[in-house]
Amino acid sequence: MSPPRLFLVAPEISADKAIACLKAACAAGDVASLLLPPSLARAVTPEAQSLGVAVLTTGEARDALRAGCDGLQVEAGDPQLPDLRAAIGKDRILGVFAGASRHAAMEASEAGADYVALSQRGASIGGEPIVKWWAEMMEVPCVAFDPVTVEGLDTLLPQKPDFIRPDDAMWESPEAARCAIADIAQYLESR
C-alpha cells in the first residue's frame, strides 16, 4: 500500500500567508489537497492549483464553483447532500466530514461522496479507531481529519488512512510549514 498523501486544512488567515505556507509545504512534501475556508477560496485557489494541489472549500456549492475550486466538503447530515453531486458535477470532488459516526460515513458514501473525513474525537473510548474500521470495510477514500504531528504517525499509519492532515501549527509561517511537512515526508519515506 502506498503511503497516505497530505490533506491540508487552512485556517482563517490572510491569503498571502496561506499561499506562502502552501508553497513551502508543497516544496517539502506530497501535498494532494487543500481545504480552504470560503473567505480564502477565490484568492488562494489559482495559486494552489498551479502547484498541482486539488482545492476544496466549505460552504455553498455555487461559491465553490465561482471560486474555481476542484470540490466542496460538507458536514454529514447536510440536508443538501443528496443533491450536491448533481449540483457540483461528476468532475468535481465531493467530500463529507462524518466525524466519528460510522453511520454518517456510510450514508455519505452512498450519497456519492468521493471521500469521507473522519475524526476520532467524540468516539467511544477503547473502541476500534474509525479510520481503521473504514479502511478495512469500505472502498471510498478517507481523510484522517484530526491534525497529526510526526510523533502521532506511529499510531495513525497502521489504521491505513488514504490522506492525513498535518498539524495546524504548519500555518504559523512558511518555515513552520516547511518543517512540519518535511518531517512527515521523511517519516513516510522511511517506512
Image (cartoon, grey):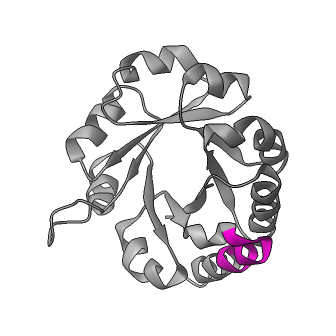
Determine whether 24 is above or below 7 in the image: below
Tell me if 7 is positioned left or right of 83 in this view. Answer: right
Q: Position of residue 185 (x, y in %)?
A: 65, 76
Task: Give the side of residue 55 with respect to residue 128, left or right.
Answer: right
> From the viewer's perspective, is residue 108 above or below residue 12?
above
Q: Nearer the viewer, residue 66 or 137?
A: 66
Residue 121 rendering spot, x and y as whole percentages? 30, 62
Give the image location of residue 98, x and y in percent.
33, 44
Q: Nearer the viewer, residue 36 or 1?
A: 36
Corner quadrant of residue 108: top left
Is residue 88 among the parts visible in the rendering? yes
Residue placed at 76% from the left, 59% from the top? 22
Magenta span dominant secondary structure: helix
Is residue 139 in sight in this rendering? no
Q: Quadrant of residue 13?
A: bottom right
Q: Position of residue 174 (x, y in %)?
A: 78, 71
Magenta-colored stretch includes residue 113: no
Q: Which residues are magenta?
A: 172-181
